[in-house]
Image (cartoon, helix red, strand yellow):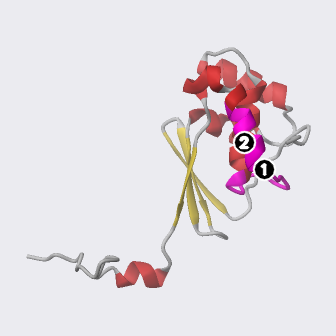
Amino acid sequence: MQHPEYPKARHQNLLVEKVGHETILYDEERQQAHSLNRSASIVWQNSDGAHSVPQLAQLVGVELGIEPNDSIVEYALDTLASANLLDDHQVSRRDVVRRMTFAGAAALALPVVLSVVAPTEAMAASGGQNGQGQNNNKQG
């Protein structure tokens, strides 16, 4: 997939918390939490519409002490787009796989975005039984 020349991270309706080198994002619209590892965090934080993919690759390289690699940034952008964390960006599964194979040599720096759907209030309040009918509220 061709990324915008200057990608831009989405900030609307997101709660952001830095935890060490990782970034935790909570999407209030979709009720999803996302955990970005260090390389994905660097790409997301610097995708401000002013940095090009090669410039982002340079930033990631300096921060992680690796050679700049556009494929790592492209993979990060694909992953961030899949999690709806970029403005006006669409991605296909084929593009993600292609980026992953190009970035394979730098697997340690591979950007990771872990996403979790937050429970609704009703689901959280019902916490009495698991999916197998067993009581999870052990007291005593």
57 w.r.t. 43: above or below: above
User: What residue do we see at 36% from left, 84% from top?
Assistant: 126
User: What residue do we see at 86% from left, 42% from top?
Assistant: 49
Q: What stretch is highlighted in magenta?
A: 82-100
> How many marks do you count on the picture?
2
- Measured in 3D between alpha carbons, the distance from the residue under mark 1 to the one under mark 2, in whole angstroms, is 7 Å
User: What residue do we see at 68% from left, 29% from top?
Assistant: 101
For disc 2, the marked residue is 96
| Image coordinates for residue 88, horizontal then vertical, percent | 85, 56
| Image coordinates for residue 111, horizontal then vertical, percent | 62, 36
Does 90 appear in magenta?
Answer: yes
Residue 34 shown left or right of residue 51 in the figure: left
| Cβ atoms at labels 1 and 2 below 8 Å apart | yes
Which type of secondary structure does the marked residue at label 2 adopt?
helix
Q: Write down the quadrant of residue 107 in the picture.
A: top right
Q: Which amino acid lies under the numbered mark 1 shown in the image of this protein?
A: Ser
121 w.r.t. 38: above or below: below
Which type of secondary structure does the marked residue at label 1 adopt?
loop
117 w.r.t. 59: above or below: below
**Callout 2: 10 Å neighbours few (<14), some, many (20+)?**
some
Q: Nearer the viewer, residue 92 or 59?
A: 92
Q: Which of 31 and 99 is in front in this view?
A: 99
Q: Residue placed farthest to the right in the image?
A: 5
Residue 116 shown left or right of residue 44 in the figure: left
| Image coordinates for residue 9, horizontal then vertical, percent | 76, 48
For disc 1, the marked residue is 92
